[in-house]
Amino acid sequence: MEFSIKTLSPEKAKLGCVVLGVYQEKDLTAPARRVDQASQGALRGTLQDFSAKAGSTLLLRALPGIAAERVLLVGLGERAKFGESAYREALRGAALALRELGARNAALFLVDVRVGAKPLSWNARHAVACVREAFYRFDEMKSGKKAPAPALAEVVLPISSNDQIRNAVREASATADGADLARTLGNLPPNVCTPSYLAEEAKKLARQYKLRVEVLERRDMEKLGMGALLAVTNASHQPPKLIVLRYEGAAKSKKPVVLVGKGITFDTGGISLKPAGEMDEMKYDMSGAGSVLGAIRALAGMRAPVNVIGVVPTCENMPGGHATRPGDIVKTLSGQTVEILNTDAEGRLILCDALTYAERFEPDVVVDIATLTGACVVALGHVVSGLFANDEKLAGELLAAGDDAWDRVWRLPLWEDYQEQLRSNFADFANIGGRPGGAITAACYLARFTRKMRWAHLDVAGTAWKSGREKGSTARPVPLLVRFVLRHAGRK
């Protein structure tokens, strides 16, 4: 799908469809008023039964005096409450309607609607993101005849072009490519998307974008002393991998941003076995890894002037005769010992060794991304991701980037008071701290391995995938990571 930037007259545009906004009070946006005038009131005459709630749509065909074959009206909601959420809901509704039409091209006369104090480049970036997300399909595992691809090949953003707008569209398209990768990796079944598969995907990215890649095998981890990561993979027949993918778009003197992604390609809970219900969704436990690969693909695709290193520890967590037991004590790469009280708290075990490994890159900042705790879902639901950080400036940057990308986060405490819950009688500390504040104590565990670095942790357990009828990967937090890295490099 191609996105172009052109100035158009909505009533004269010879396209398959023009998309116009209508507020819930039946107020028309400026382009909609022009179409109404050109059609001698035919557009306004259709509004009686149109709710105009944000995202609702009404398709009109062959309006008199209008060059376009179709006019798609999209509800913007109440004018007084119109903001980022309503704008994105309108874009999503428009995109879903366009997906079902046979139009080859369309113009989104929504991108010039003012969204608070946001610049039009923000509007354009989110227009591309919402359309691309709506048109994503995952059907490669189905054996039947695939549905034909949507006909829409070109989307016109009818606003005046400038460097900011062009850069926003280029960034959004590259970010969508990265999100598609992360989404597909998450949606693939665990018998396909194994640790080895993730390693091969990283190698493909390296070949495609001329990146540097290194994959550490089990013997490498044993030599290094990654006892925590190896404990998780003990019972799996799939070999573990530690993937290191480097994108170098800035001067060598510029310290890198390191992104560390949890890559549990399937999580049974190990000996601390999970309930059978919805265990299939544990294929999404590699969403942190997928988001790291997706973010690097996006940054490389737009040739961003940044240095980024992705570190992906990946393995399966399986039961079996060789599985790690509750009560086992392991020595981590950092030299600290951990008493494993629950083998289903495995994400922090692979992350702690990966975080220690990340020190060797002398990073500017480190951000880890993990579907880490059900407790974070209880605390924050499925709207925002949990944010923890040992650096105030870094936390602020991630909060701002999340708002900018509308891939939002909420900061939770990382106080030393919580460390007491990790106390162990037999090792330096335990891998769990009990039910109270479970997301916090998980982050506090990781904090013990990041004291030498500016570090943040994103718990995306509630946001990385959807359950129910719309089951599937969301690709979050790829948009947040891309925005954060660019803003961190000074490109706001």
Image (tube, rainbow, N blue to C red):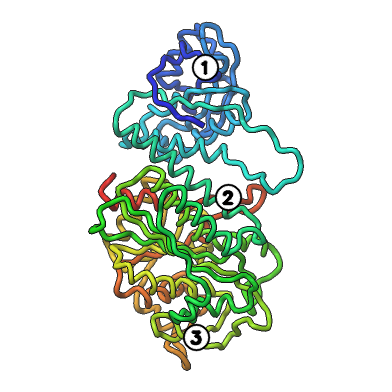
Q: Kindly state the secondary structure of the residue where label 1 is placed.
A: loop
Q: Cα distance, mark 1 to mark 3?
A: 64 Å
Taking the spot 43% from the left edge, 71% from the top edge, the residue there is 354
Residue lying furthest bottom in this view?
426
Which residue does the numbered mark 3 point to in the structure image? 330
Q: Closer to the camera, 216 or 158?
A: 216
| Element marked by disc 2 | helix
Residue 303 x, y percent position in the rendering: 35, 44
Nearer-N-terminus badge (2/1) = 1
Query: Is 255 located above or below residue 353 in the figure?
Result: above
- Type of amino acid under label 1: Leu
Task: Please indicate whether residue 230 sits to the left or right of residue 398 in the image.
Answer: right
Query: Going 40% across and 23% down the picture, which residue do you hit?
Result: 158
The x and y percentages for residue 352 are: 43, 74
User: Distance from label 2 to label 1 (Cα)?
Assistant: 32 Å
Tell me which residue sits at (54%, 75%) in the image: 345
Few, some or many residues within 10 Å of mark 3 (<14, 14–19, 20+): many
Where 411 falls versus 306 (above or below)? below
| Quadrant of the rendering where the C terminus is positioned | top left
Q: Are marks 2 and 3 in contact (CB under 8 Å)?
A: no
Residue ID for mark 1: 15
Few, some or many residues within 10 Å of mark 2 (<14, 14–19, 20+): many
Q: Nearer the viewer, mark 2 or mark 1?
A: 2
Left or right: 23 with respect to 325? left
Identify which amino acid the numbered label 3 is placed on: Val
- Mark 1, other Cα within 10 Å: few <14 / some 14–19 / many ≥20: many
Residue that badge 2 annotates: 184
Is mark 2 in CB contact (under 8 Å) with mark 1? Answer: no
Whether residue 254 is visible to the viewer of this picture, yes or no, is yes
Q: Determine if residue 400 is in view.
A: no
